[in-house]
Image (spheres, grey):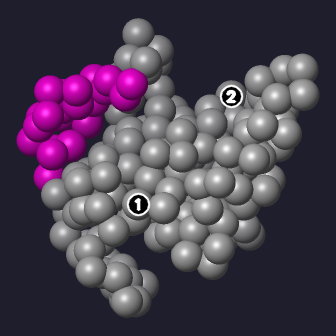
Amino acid sequence: MRGNQMIIEDFDIDGEMIRNEAVRRLHSNEPPYVVKEGDKYDVHANNLHFTCCYSNEEIEKMADLCLELLEELRRINEAGYTGADLLKAEESAKGDKASIFEFFSVYKTFKTDKIEELIDKLATTTRVGGAYYMILARPSFVSGILSVFGAVIDNFRDASLYFSALFMLIRLAMHMHCDEE
């Protein structure tokens, strides 16, 4: 990473441009599933509806971290972890009794120290920690990573899908410290 610019090697999608477009949409109430009033955001992300308060700087930092996270997921995919591997991990996790154990079992099959570090930095940026982070915010975010990775794996070169994945990760990060609607 150079300044605020992500270096994407051998990759024909401009991650920085996509990141900037996601942030622009967050700040300009576009599309309608994120409405901003001052520092308050009213957010819809799939089945989530919540409000949260973040400064422009916090949103920018979340976008940077989510872009790094998405790039780490791309590297994992390019290193040989495929959609078939993800499906196999999901199948073998179905024996776990509680859903939290299921998705953490799947997550463990591809997680890296870099992903863990980025999630921790997102927690700091979103002002969550302690038991709330460990019991609520982190598991919810990890579940979101699985959904995003499942949607984009083996298709990272699709610019529209890449944008959607980044935009979803940002909204999931915003959800780490929010009021549910």
Crowd rating for badge 2 (residues with CA inside 10 Å; few <14, some 14–19, many 20+) = few
Q: Circle 2 — which element?
A: helix
The residue segment tinted magenta is 24-46
Q: Residue at x 25, y 36 (%)?
A: 39
Q: In the current view of this chain or complex, which residue is farthest to the front? A: 84
Checking the image for residue 141, the label placed there is: none
Name the residue type under label 2: Leu
Q: Is residue 23 above or below residue 82?
A: above
- Left/right placement of residue 21 relative to residue 174 reads left
Q: Is residue 75 magenta?
A: no
| Residue occupied by mark 1 | 155
Cα separation, mark 2 vs mark 1, equals 30 Å
Q: Tell me which label, 2 or 1, sits earlier in the chain.
A: 2
- Residue at left 82%, top 29%? 94
Residue 59: x percent and y percent? 33, 51
Foreground mark, 2 or 1?
Answer: 1
- Residue 128 drawn at (x, y percent): 61, 40
Specify the amino acid type for callout 1. Answer: Asn
Residue at the (38%, 42%) spot, across then down: 168
Is 47 above or below relative to 17?
above
- Please give left or right for residue 155 compared with residue 103 in the image: left
Secondary element at tag 1: loop
Q: Which residue is mark 2?
A: 136
User: What x and y, as percent, mark residue 61?
Assistant: 39, 61
Q: Nearer the viewer, residue 172 or 155?
A: 155
Question: How far from the left and from the top, in percent, is residue 7?
Answer: 37, 86
Nearer-the-camera pick, 82 or 44: 82
Using a 10 Å C-alpha cutoff, classify the residue at mark 1 as few (fewer than 14 neighbours), some (14 to 19) or many (20 or more).
some
Quadrant of res 40:
top left
> Residue drawn 84% across and 21% down?
98
